[in-house]
Image: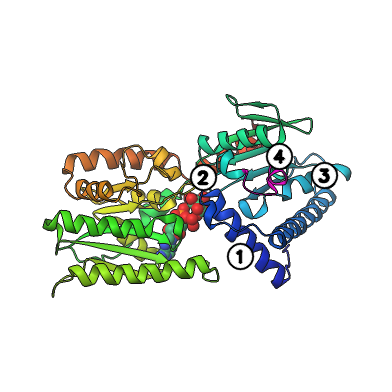
Amino acid sequence: MSVHIDPKIFDSYYNGCCNGTFWPLFHSMPDRAMFCAEHWRAYVQVNQEFAEKTIKALEILAKEEPADSGTPLVWIHDYHLMLAANTIRNIAEERNLKFKLGFFLHIPFPPWDIFRLFPWSDEILQGMLGCDMVGFHIEDYCLNFVDCCQRRLGCRVDRKNLLVEHGGRTVRIRPLPIAIPYERFVQLAKAAPRVIDSKQKIVLGVDRLDYTKGLVHRLKAFETLLEKHPEHREKVTLLQIAVPSRTDVKEYQDLKEEMDQLVGRINGRFTTPNWSPIRYIYGCISQDELASFYRDAAVALVTPLRDGMNLVAKEFVACQINSPPGVLVVSPFAGAGEMMHEALISNPYEIDAAAEVIHRALTMPEDERTLRMNYLRKREKVHDVNYWMRSFLKAMGTLITEDGDDVLP
Ligand code: ADQ
């Protein structure tokens, strides 16, 4: 069952409200956010349309499924649909439909001081509180949400147990860090042919071309590394892969231009007849090629200015099957930086210090690299995407085991 949206409404909804407002605001970059009533109206309308289609699906289920076949779960994803839950609940309750509603936000939830800038912030909170359970990547985002519910809506909250009372119900808030299909990446890494020339050390960056990912800061840190540690010249190359993203939005067009100029300037400054410091790929690459880069890179730089989680950090770790392994550098402002304690932590805003962290990663002794990577890999192996999904279903009280029993949270 699909939702058909008028192209003009879609533009206001998707490029306007989702990517022009929520994306920058929720990444704590309010100066980049636009607040526009027309975009907001489109957002309300599209959420309403998704909610109505969901009700239709619940009605079909109620007719087709036997009465004892369990409660249908509606799992809503991400900032594009923050209002839908409340509408679904109101209509479904009126029509006596059985349902459980869960929501997962893939980006950060900002602190109150940022969130309150949004003119219709109470409607967003009420929308999300239509759920039985709301999941975020990490506890910080949960606490931000709880705080906003208390301060904007005056809800009674329990910070310790992450509960919010609203409309006579108690909504559970849970940190559920997303993960990757770990084994799939291990297998890809085992099978992928070598692409990187073995004489060179590669420092790898893989990102959507997005201003939250800290690409400009990263290039400047690499430039500083070459300035301060000339021993790395002609030996180390930054391979930056940037996937084109939201190319209809001006902020993204400007970033593309800035990156092109910066790469040109740094390469012009340091290139020798046999070496260029930066190889910059603007485009998508295949999973095989990606796995090969992840496997053979000496260092991965995952240094966003702000990021909900960041899957690249996890994919890199899964593909590190070489011995001795490489080094992961991660920003403290990504959800991944909260969890992957054995990585080197680097503040992307501090360019000089970030250059020193790259130097440290490039010169780290083999046994330290191995120790750190072993811990990182073990965590991702156990806490893979299946574990994440099961954790969500458990937290909803809807996980059915192979024996058909409900597993309680
Ligand atoms: P994104 O912001 O898109 O996701 P991220 O988590 O890094 O960011 O995922 C990017 C994905 O794109 C990775 O799986 C990566 O392999 C793939 N990719 C990147 N470059 C590629 C290329 N050149 N070719 C092919 N594939 C490429 C949002 C949030 C994150 C959160 C995820 C999941 O912003 O914080 O981790 O959702 O919840």
Residue at coordinates 70% horizontally, 49% vertically from top-left?
120
Q: Secondary structure at mark 3?
A: helix
The percent coordinates of residue 232 (x first, y second) are 15, 58
> Left of 316 or right of it: where is 408?
right
Q: CA distance from mark 2 to mark 1?
A: 32 Å
Residue identified by numbered label 1: 15
Please determine whether, in this image, residue 7 is positioned above or below residue 98.
below
Please name whichever residue, 185 or 114, is drawn nearer the observer in this view of the structure: 114
The percent coordinates of residue 282 (x first, y second) are 39, 71
Q: CA distance from mark 3 to mark 2?
A: 31 Å
- The mark found on residue 90 in the picture is 3
Q: Which residues are magenta?
A: 116-125
Residue identified by numbered label 2: 386
Q: Secondary structure at mark 4?
A: loop
Residue identified by numbered label 4: 129
Asked which quadrant contains residue 121, the reply is top right
Q: Earlier in the sequence, mark 4 or mark 2?
A: 4
The amino acid type, in three-letter code, at marker 3 is: Asn
Q: Earlier in the sequence, mark 3 or mark 1?
A: 1
Q: Secondary structure at mark 2?
A: helix
> Left of 286 or right of it: where is 116?
right
Q: In this rendering, which labeled residue sits more in front, label 3 or label 1?
A: 1
Whether pointer 4 and pointer 3 mark residues with C-beta atoms closer than 8 Å, the reply is no
The amino acid type, in three-letter code, at marker 2 is: Asn
Query: For mark 2, does the 10 Å Cα neighbourhood hold few (<14), some (14 to 19), or many (20 or more) residues?
Result: some
Quarter holding the C terminus is top right
